[in-house]
Amino acid sequence: MNMVAIFHSYKFTHFTDKEIDKTNSPIKLTTAEKIKTLILGVNNPRPANNKTPIQEYETIKLRSNREIECWNIKTDNPKGSVILFHGFSGHKSTMLDKAAIFQKFGYNTLLVDFMGAGGSEGNQSTIGFLEAEQVKTCFDYLINQGEKNIYLFGTSMGAAAIMKAINDHQFSPKGIIIECPFGSMYETVCARFNTMNTPTFPMASLLVFWGGLQNGFWAFGHNPREYSKNITCPTLLLYGEQDKKVNRKEIDEIYANLNAKKILKTFPQAGHENYLTKYKSKWKEYIEAFLNTEQIP
């Protein structure tokens, strides 16, 4: 079981440049495919940007714990800036639709490829742990450019990375907008087993242990629920009520731990997905209200 866990955790946290098909979502796998996936791990092709901004933009390389690539898109007479961070197996081009909305609201946007994705260095993902340092690097970059009104936006892994960055470095953006952050590394691994209708014990624990060891950190301590206790800036927390990867208990505990002005809004028919697909008008409404008044009607 340890050998299976070692192989599985490595494949989950390291993308491949080889031309292979990505493993389907667990709910779409046949029984035979689920068994194969449980033994051999998931196929994760390295995330690649599949489109570029239609507006004029600047490509920026920043040196953090890895070299990361960003797209800087400016607007006329900006009210401030929003930095956007993607989820696991994502890339900055998946943030273009949301960035366009922030731009319409009058904000410059900085879209970021975490390490292992798009134009950034490496093929590794630590599900928000090492990525937190990259969040701080991007924030510092805008501060050094003279920007004072900075919001951070992150979805899933991106949300967890934002929370860890604030916990570790104790800085305060103007506000954060976080979508479906998981409660802990262990819980998010368990959720993936649950979607495949397989027992979490003992493989989930082994996967977390070996995954952390292979990537140089204690994965059982990667805990956004605890990070939220040290977040003191205004926070908009968004969640899809049909989410199979993050449960409502995790969201409620994170929300309860936040130590600032906070708003929780949910989308009844959304899962762990882009909320613009089913709730674009509502998403825009909540975001605009938060940016303008830091309150949701």
Image: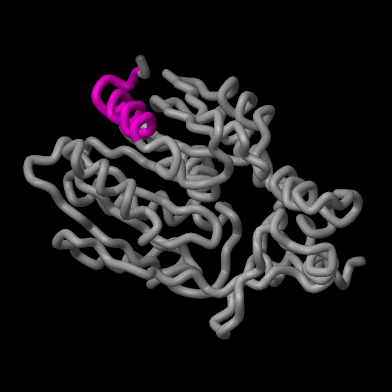
> Image check: 34 left or right of 284?
right
Q: Colour scheme used in the picture? A: one colour
Where 288 falls versus 97 (above or below)?
A: above
Q: Quadrant of the C terminus?
A: top left
Inspect this view and state whether residue 169 appears.
no
Foreground of the two, 79 or 192: 192
Locate residue 88, reporting x and y percent. Answer: 55, 57
> Image check: 56 left or right of 267?
left
At x 69% / y 58%, what residue is drawn? 28
Q: Quadrant of residue 9?
A: bottom right
User: Which residue sits furthest left?
Assistant: 77
Q: Quadrant of the N terminus?
A: bottom right
Residue 77 in magenta? no
User: Which residue sits furthest top?
Assistant: 297
At x 37% / y 37%, what residue is drawn? 280
Inspect this view and state whether residue 255 appears.
yes
Locate residue 74, reporting x and y percent. Answer: 15, 52
Where 264 falls versus 283 (above or below)?
A: above
Locate residue 281, reporting x and y percent. Answer: 34, 32
Locate residue 86, reporting x and y percent. Answer: 45, 53
> Image check: 274 left or right of 186?
left
At x 62% / y 39%, what residue is drawn? 243
> Image check: 55 left or right of 259?
left
Q: Quadrant of residue 71?
A: bottom left
At x 18% / y 62%, what residue is drawn? 57
Residue 285 in magenta? yes
Segment colored magenta: 281-295
Q: How many numbered tags mark residues here? A: 0
Q: Quadrant of residue 209?
A: bottom right
Q: Main secondary structure of the magenta part?
A: helix
Where 203 falls versus 33 (above or below)?
A: above
